[in-house]
């Protein structure tokens, strides 16, 4: 065999071995990169879904509970006004009773002097 034939045979054997090893390694690397890309896409999709859900919940809380909060505030103000009116009425009654108690004490003192 000539040296060119031996070189060609050696080149073919090397190509066969390297090709036989490189092809599965290349496929494995491609599969790994592809799997990582898919996982990254799934994570990004899940983050987007979570972000949309949180924004929706915040909007519902802001809109739905905002009107309920305003209604509660109006009810609280009405209750405070009612309590203020009742407080004024009770204070008038207390003042009247205090005055009557004072007159009763004075009359009791006058009766004690007369007896």
Image (spheres, rainbow, N blue to C red):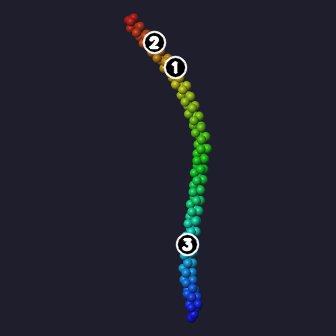
Residue tagged 2? 103
Q: Are marks 2 and 1 in contact (CB under 8 Å)?
A: no
- Measuring from the top left, give residue 31's x and y in whole percent: 57, 71
User: Residue at the location (59% across, 59% down)?
Assistant: 45
Q: Which mark is residue 50?
A: none
Quadrant housing the C terminus: top left
Separation of disc 2 and disc 1 at Cα?
A: 17 Å
Q: Which mark lies nearer to you, 2 or 1?
A: 1
**Dot 2: element:** helix
Tally of numbered discs? 3
Separation of disc 3 and disc 1 at Cα?
A: 91 Å
Is residue 62 in sight in this rendering? yes
Mark 1 residue crowding within 10 angstroms, few (<14) / some (14–19) / many (20+): few
Location of residue 28 by image quarter: bottom right
**Dot 1: element:** helix
- Measuring from the top left, give residue 57's x and y in whole percent: 58, 49
Judged from this view, the residue extending furthest toward the top is 114
User: Residue at the location (45% across, 15% down)?
Assistant: 101
User: Which mark is first along the chain, 1 or 2?
Assistant: 1
- Measuring from the top left, give residue 41's x and y in whole percent: 59, 62
User: Residue at the location (61% across, 44% down)?
Assistant: 63
- Measuring from the top left, give residue 13's x and y in whole percent: 55, 86
Q: Which mark is residue 29?
A: 3
Q: Which mark is residue 92?
A: 1
Separation of disc 2 and disc 3 at Cα?
A: 105 Å
Q: Nearest the camera: 9 or 49?
A: 9
Q: Which mark lies nearer to you, 2 or 3?
A: 3
User: Which mark is first along the chain, 1 or 3?
Assistant: 3
Q: Nearest the camera: 43 or 108?
A: 43
Q: Which mark lies nearer to you, 3 or 1?
A: 3
Quadrant housing the N terminus: bottom right
């Amino acid at each position: 065999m000539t040296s060119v034939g031996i070189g060609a045979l050696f080149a073919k054997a090397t190509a066969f071995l390297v090709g036989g090893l490189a092809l599965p390694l290349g496929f494995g690397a491609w599969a790994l990169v592809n799997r990582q890309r898919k996982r990254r896409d799934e994570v990004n999709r899940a983050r987007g879904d979570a972000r949309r859900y949180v924004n929706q919940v915040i909007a519902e809380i802001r809109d739905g509970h905002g009107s309920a909060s305003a209604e509660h505030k109006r009810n609280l103000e009405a209750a405070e006004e009612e309590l203020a009116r009742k407080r004024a009425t009770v204070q008038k009654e207390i003042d009247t009773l205090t005055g009557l108690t004072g007159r009763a004490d004075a009359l009791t003192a006058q009766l004690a002097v007369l007896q």
